[in-house]
Image (spheres, rainbow, N blue to C red):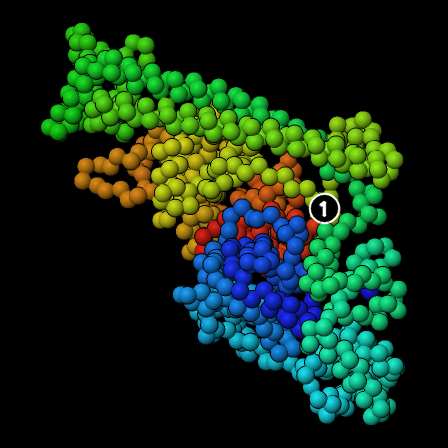
Amino acid sequence: MERKRAMTSVDLAALVGELREYTGAVVDKAYLYGDDLVRLKMRDFDRGRIELIVEVGDPKRAHVASPEHVPDAPGRPPNFAKMLRNRIAGANFAGVEQHGFDRILTFRFEREDATTLVVAELFGDGNVAVTTEDLEVIGCLDVVRLRSRTVAPGSQYGYPDQRFSPLDCEYDAFAARMRESDTDLVRTLATQLNLGGLYAEELCRRAGVEKELDIADATEDHFEALFGALERLREPVLEGRTDPRLYEDDDGLVVDATPVPIEEHEAAGYAATAFERFNGALDEYFHRLINEADEVAEAGDEGPDFEAEIAKYQRIIDQQEGAIEDFEAQAEAEQQKAESLYAHYDLVDEICSTIREARQDGVPWREIEETFAEGAERGIPEAEAVVGIDEAEGTVTVDLGEVTVTVDPSLGVERNADELYTEAKRIREKKEGALEAIEDTREDLEAAKERREEWKRAREGADGEVAGPAADGADGADGADGEPVERDYLSMRSVPVRSDEKWYERFRWFRTSDGFLVLGGRNADQNEELVKKYMEPSDRFFHAQAHGAPVTLLKGTEPDEAARDVEIPDRSREEAAQFAVSYSSVWKDGAFEGDAYEVGPDQVSKTPESGEYIEKGGFVIRGDREYYRDVPVGVAIGITCEPDTRVIGGPPTAVEPRVETSVRLEPGRYAQNDVAKRLYRVFRERFADTSFVRKVASPDRIQEFCPPGGSRMLDD
């Protein structure tokens, strides 16, 4: 028999009575995992913490879970979870109803300002809808638009037409539906009476009738025996006198949890464990169903690549230590510049005043520079100190002996010095952040080492000796012949999650085929931030030749490294150009190609020409540009498993070689959130470990890499 992966209508009928016992509990918080598991954390004066789990994907379930069976809270709540929290946080749980004999539960939450209904559809593709008291849909996991019903924000929620219910029917109605059938007894009970396969066979066994007897040959005695068995089955369910059982097969794997003992399971030889409450049986069943390891399959598994994980953390620590040294040197340099400005206050003030007055009189920058050059020839100290003027930025660089400082003449000495002090403070704060990060990384390193030792001990206990890569003297990343071990992560039953979240992930980002980091702004504020805070002299600035395009920085060095001269390959530049075009309005407009250009950081300015105005997030580009014509749009989104596990997205040539599996997108008709959900389902189908996909590639994380506007998968 297959293991149950969805609760039956009988299960839900038995569960409703137990769930109503939690009436009055107060909602603390709501969570969404992936696109199908909702968790409501509640508290009750008598019972304390209550965890309500509703999962509408695979498996389909609803029950109260023990705290140790609850998954850790996800890092970033998606919009659905935020909306649900806003509606029911602080509300009282006011009860739950089953819709007829359908696999639909409606939870009611009451708060002084509003009453909210949460409707869980545990059939078909599954769905959760949040509605007002009069059933206006506020939000839902999936939009449904059918001739018979609609589930979409702003619409009136439409329950499906109620099915025939065997739990409250009289004998005449029961017998009439049986006689209308043209098949055998068991199939009629399963389909026409809506009992499903298990309970249809159970009624036949309890009634003592041949389940495959054709309806045409059935007598009134058969129908009366079956109805009597139905009454004996449904009475304890309807009256709350359940006697729950958890059933296991010969291998100790759970196969079912039922509200009453099932003779069919006992006849099949399944071991039964009695539970006091059906909630408890369901919780234990689904926890084990999701987490049980198939020991036979795992016997051939070489185990997680701990050595690669350990090596990764050690590399990160080495990089962080180098960055900390650089931060301190940079902070000292900025502070010294500020102090030098005050030490040469009169000199710098005279230079700034001269330039301000000249600009107010309309003197061009070129003439100002020529005037300082002539003054230097005559030996004027202020003129001799000026070593350069940047017309694009409106700045002057002054040699103060021990240091050279670039200042903005329009700000005066004090404000220029203050900005340098502020920059020194910001760099020291980055250093403090790096010190905290290195401690976190050291903890991750020790945790990885401990997991390696636990895994070794577990294998020794199972096999009597250490199995896997450590047993043959390999370093964990290589096989016996010294070649790297190829892991089929798609087929692994348990993929280890190795996360190392970076600060820059709040921007759009990807790494080029050559390993260079590319950052893109998601909005005007981020465009400003990228240019003002993170653009370095060794970077390259890209922008699509279209309105609504993001600032795109191709970083010549890592964010925690000091800027230096770097040769960036043409392939990385072309990928950055494709990234800039794909995440611009070109994609939103449904076009399949566009133009982009590249300039150096010194060509990007916030200073407009006289009489002009620059909008927030906009910049002035001066000088020659290198154009990339007719760049094709293209985005691939995939999941990496080494050296860490995460969703990544960007130009296909950069993404596809780095991921275990991916899907290409092109402009299409599905909105960002819809295509993200479709991708999530594709990834869940491709990985044997679906819980891994839920942890690292939930729809909201996938959506972060989807271009603005509509998209479609290329294999749609």
* Residue that extends furthest to the left in the rendered view of this protein: 361
User: As drawn, is 528 to the left or to the right of 637?
Assistant: left
Up/down of 147 relative to 313, above or below = below
In the rendered structure, which amino acid carries the disc numbered 1?
Answer: Ser
Q: Quadrant of residue 57?
A: bottom right
* Residue that extends furthest to the front in the rendered view of this protein: 46
- Dot 1, crowdedness within 10 Å: few (<14), some or many (≥20)? many
- The reply to whether residue 36 is in sight is no
What residue do we see at 24% from left, 16% from top? 342
- Give the image location of residue 434, x and y in percent: 49, 28
Q: Quadrant of the N terminus?
A: bottom right
Q: Which of 159/679 is in front?
A: 159
- Give the image location of residue 302, x and y in percent: 79, 38
What residue do we see at 27% from left, 12% from top? 400
* Label 1 element class: loop
Mark 1, residue position: 494
Q: Which of 22/256 is in front?
A: 22
- Give the image location of residue 595, x and y in percent: 42, 44
Q: Which of 309/177 is in front?
A: 177
Q: Quadrant of the C terminus?
A: bottom right
Q: Quadrant of residue 264?
A: bottom right
User: As drawn, is 629 to the left or to the right of 124?
Assistant: left
User: As drawn, is 469 to the left or to the right of 561?
Assistant: right
- The reply to whether residue 157 is in sight is yes
What residue do we see at 54% from left, 22% from top? 321
- Give the image location of residue 596, x and y in percent: 41, 42
Up/down of 181 relative to 133, above or below = below
Q: Quadrant of residue 307?
A: top right
User: As drawn, is 388 to the left or to the right of 130?
Assistant: left
